[in-house]
Image (tube, rainbow, N blue to C red):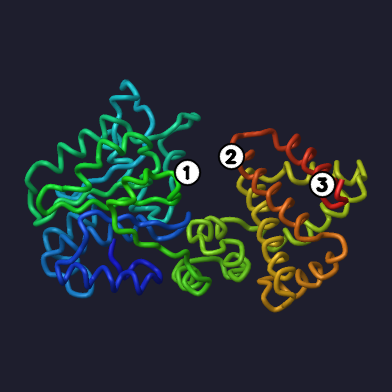
Amino acid sequence: MQFQTIPGQTKLITQFRAMVKNDRLPHAILLMGPKGSAKLPLAIALANYIQCENRNDDVCGTCKSCLKSQKLIHPDIHFCYPVVKKERLKREDTTSKDFLLEFRTFIQNRPFEEIKEWIASITSTTSTANINTKECNEIVQKLGLQSFEGTYKIQIIWMAEYLAKDSNRLLKLIEEPTDDTIIILIAENQEKLLATILSRCQIFNVAKFTDEEINSYLENLNLSPTLNKEKIKQLADGDLEKAIHLTQQSKTDDYSELLMNWMRVSWKGHPQGIFDFVNQMIKSNKEEQKVFYEYGIHFFREYLVYLYTRDVHKMRLSDKERNTALQMIKTIDEEKAQSLSELFNESIHMIDRNINGKILFSANSFQLGRIMKGA
């Protein structure tokens, strides 16, 4: 992973370069950012940059350290991440090293994927992932040893929220690390981290991607010319991982009329209309159903922008969608729009929990009607 392979983040990358070159890099770093941002790629690129023997504005890519770092096998760059029980092992005995081969493959092929996709890639069950006590003890032990090849020992902890109370075991190490040790924590939810951890780290906020950065990344992919990249950018809302997933869908253009039709039949409470809609939706796979709900969230997010600003040009919607939004003013107020967004968001979580699609869409049809009528 190199800085140049990461879209955007110019200001943060420039700051990291200067800190490394001037030997002013903090020993404990926390990269905070939303889902689908460049948190993990940035952490890996920074670790590779630190270890590079001939770095300039980026890694050289050819030295011994770079060749190993690119394969995620550098002996002085350690990774910790949430895992589940490994076959033939007790959960309390399972740590990141037991999934190291899977992790390397996952990151090299899908660098902007997030924790949900990682967990799904290593288990087909509903097992709860975490970073356990044994893992924390091994981190302390590893960083207490001398480095193998590089000047620094670097520990990357992906999704530090999964440490929970076990992060207490790392407090002393983070506050008073061994010589030439750098710890890089990555997280999405600051509220789930212990205050004692936050106080010992220098926090760097990783912004979500802009539409221009997502567009630039998509332009470099071999995508079908029929894909509506503009709609994909809008639906992704700064989440590059979501944008990549949306390129694999074929129906992003169809959801506007589908959503409006659903709202009409739900408002009327027409049984046959609801029945037809539900049967249409259950023919789609789960990912397509989630994208439909994500479209609904996007539409009402932009609709709320208009309600707040009364500036039609600030809505990231097509002309047809804007006209539809304007026709809803007398029916859907701010409270109703927020309730609909919450309904759609909860529905995505329900799909992830494998709820029966027919039951979900049927129940939501009646709930949609109640919300619109203020019942």
- Residue at image x 40%, y 63%? 206
> Looking at the rendering, in which quadrant would you find the N terminus?
bottom left
SS at mark 3? helix
Horizontal arrangement in the rendering, residue 348 relative to residue 219 (left or right)? right
- Residue at image x 63%, y 45%? 348
Label 1 – label 3 distance at C-alpha: 29 Å
Sequence-wise, the earlier of marks 1 and 3 is 1
Label 3 – label 2 distance at C-alpha: 21 Å
Q: Which residue is mark 3?
A: 277
Residue 118 point in image, percent of width and height: 42, 43
Q: Residue 139 or 347: which is nearer the viewer? A: 139
Horizontal arrangement in the rendering, residue 58 relative to residue 299 (left or right)? left
Residue 330 point in image, percent of width and height: 87, 64
- Residue at image x 34%, y 36%? 131
Residue 253 point in image, percent of width and height: 69, 63
Would you call the spot at circle 2 few (<14 residues within 10 Å), some (14-19), or many (20 or more)? Answer: few
Give the amino acid type for the residue marked by disc 2 in the picture.
Answer: Asp
Q: Which residue is mark 1?
A: 116
- Whether residues under marks 3 and 2 lie with C-beta atoms below 8 angstroms apart, the answer is no
| Above or below for 73 versus 53 | above
- Residue at image x 68%, y 49%? 342
Q: What is the number of the mark on residue 100?
A: none
- Whether residues under marks 1 and 3 lie with C-beta atoms below 8 angstroms apart, the answer is no
Q: Which residue is mark 2?
A: 352
Q: Residue 212 or 276: which is nearer the viewer? A: 212
Sequence-wise, the earlier of marks 3 and 2 is 3
Sequence-wise, the earlier of marks 2 and 1 is 1
Horizontal arrangement in the rendering, residue 123 relative to residue 179 (left or right)? right
- Whether residues under marks 2 and 1 lie with C-beta atoms below 8 angstroms apart, the answer is yes
Would you call the spot at circle 1 few (<14 residues within 10 Å), some (14-19), or many (20 or more)? Answer: few
> Looking at the rendering, in which quadrant would you find the C terminus?
top right
